[in-house]
Each structure stands twice: as C-alpha cells, then as structure tokens.
Image (cartoon, coloured by chain):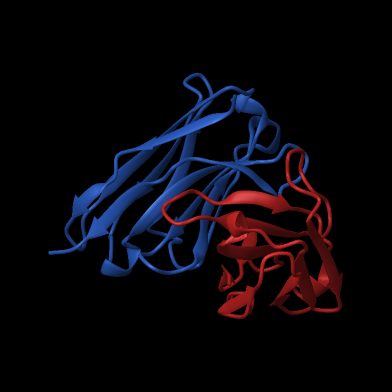
Chain colours: A blue, B red
Amino acid sequence: EVQLVESGGGLVQPGGSLRLSCAASGFTFSGHYMDWVRQAPGKGLEWVGRTRDKPHSYITEYAASVKGRFTVSRDDSQDSVYLQMTSLKTEDTAVYYCVRVQGGNAHVLDYWGQGTLVTVSS
Amino acid sequence: QSALTQPASVSGSPGQSITISCTGTSSDVGGYNFVSWYQQHPGKAPQLMIYDVSIRPSGVSNRFSGSKSGNTASLTISGLQAEDEADYYCCSFSISTALVFGTGTEVTVL
C-alpha cells in the first residue's frame, strides 16, 4: 500500500523558515517524481514544486509564487522528500501535501499524503 | 500562470447527471491531452478520479467520465449519489509551469 506521511508543519513567524518532510513507503520511491501541493484555508489547490528522479538528474521545478524561496529535495536512500521553505509570508499559510507523480505520466498526481499545516503569523 | 476556470458550485438530485467545466487556454488545457480531475471530501486529501482527459484509474466508478473540446475540459458524474458530494478540481499540464489547477467546484447533492 502506498503511503505518504508529511511532518514538520507548525507555526512560524513571517520571514522565518521551516522544513517539511515526507516519508514514503509501499512503492519504489526512487522511480518516481515527487511533488508538493498546497491549499490555503478555504481555498483551492496550488502546485508548489517538484523533484524529478535520478535518471532525470533530480531536476527541480517551482511555481512562480515560491521560486527562490522554497527548495524541494529528496533522499532516495531514506525514501523521503523535503520542502525547505524560507522567507515565509503570511500567504504561505496552507496545508502542504506530499504527492507522488504517476510513473511515466508527469502530469498525473496519483497518491497524496494527508497533509501538514503550516501557519505563518506573528 | 492563472488558475483554470471552474464554476464555483454545481448541484443535482440523486440519480441525475451533472457536468463540471474547466476552461483554460491553448497553453494548457487546449494544447495537450493532459487534463486530470481530483475529488476532495472535507478535511481529506484529494483523490485522482480521471487523467489524460478521460482515463479512469482502477477503482474509480464508471459513473465518472471526462472529455475535452478546445480549451475546455469537462467532468461528468452520472447517477449522482450522496457520496459524490465533494469539491472537484481539474488540473492540466502547462507550458509555463509543470501543473496548473482549476479554481475548484463544490458539488452538492440535493
């Protein structure tokens, strides 16, 4: 069974940093791109960023709203993906989901974690 | 990259069919057959319902179907059931960003 478990959310002040983790199990982690998607309270889904797999040089991509502030990374030896968030703004407040990208279909998000809440507030 | 446009809400009676639209541009929805749909119940994570415009993943009811015409994709739910009450989001590949989501549609079963 595919499982994605996020951790690391919490309350942080504007301008601060936070690192989210996602532990994966139940599939060959190294063979999949991994994404982060967020959802502000009462709002819609927003794609945040992606790490590709080793054959694709672990290339990362980001939404314009977070580029230069957020960094996606992965550790295939630990079956984990991370989201390092810096220079946080109040508008970054959201539930952050770790998501598996379907193998061979880079536009399909086939398994989602339960999410971790990040609150940016003074 | 602007979000794809969906109606804020759609409603129907049990047994009826409803259709949710998702309008983008030639740079996303209209340019590629890479549209997917996600269902989200309150307080839960989204779940993949349709991908590549019209393909249902294993385990998804055949009451859900997808289509596309020009820059607009559609999700149809036939034989509406109480359990279908949820938020629905379309999503597309975009040339300007890896993925772009729709604004979301709240489905109410009357």
**Would residue B53 appear left or right of A44 to someone viewing this image?**
right
Task: Look at 79% across and 48% down and name the residue there.
Answer: B56
Q: Nearer the viewer, residue A106 or B5?
A: B5
> Among all residues in the image, which is located at the extreme left?
A122
> Among all residues in the image, which is located at the extreme right?
B69
Q: Position of residue A1 (x, y in %)?
A: 59, 24
Q: Nearer the viewer, residue B82 or A111?
A: B82
Task: Look at 58% across and 72% down and name the residue there.
Answer: B110
Whether residue A44 is visible, yes or no, is yes
- Residue A15 sits above or below residue B27 on the image: above
Q: Position of residue B5 (x, y in %)?
A: 63, 79
**Would residue B93 appear left or right of A60 to someone viewing this image?**
right
Task: Look at 34% across and 63% down and name the residue there.
Answer: A92
**Would residue A12 appear left or right of B18 to someone viewing this image?**
left
Quarter the C terminus of chain A occupies: bottom left
Q: Quadrant of residue B73?
A: bottom right
Q: Nearer the viewer, residue B66 or A105?
A: B66
Q: Give the tally of numbered discs.
A: 0
Task: Look at 57% across and 62% down and name the residue there.
Answer: B85
Q: Nearer the viewer, residue B8 or A82?
A: B8
Q: Quadrant of residue A28?
A: top right
- Residue B49 sits above or below residue B5 on the image: above
- Residue A80 sits above or below residue B11 on the image: above
Q: Position of residue B102 (x, y in %)?
A: 61, 70
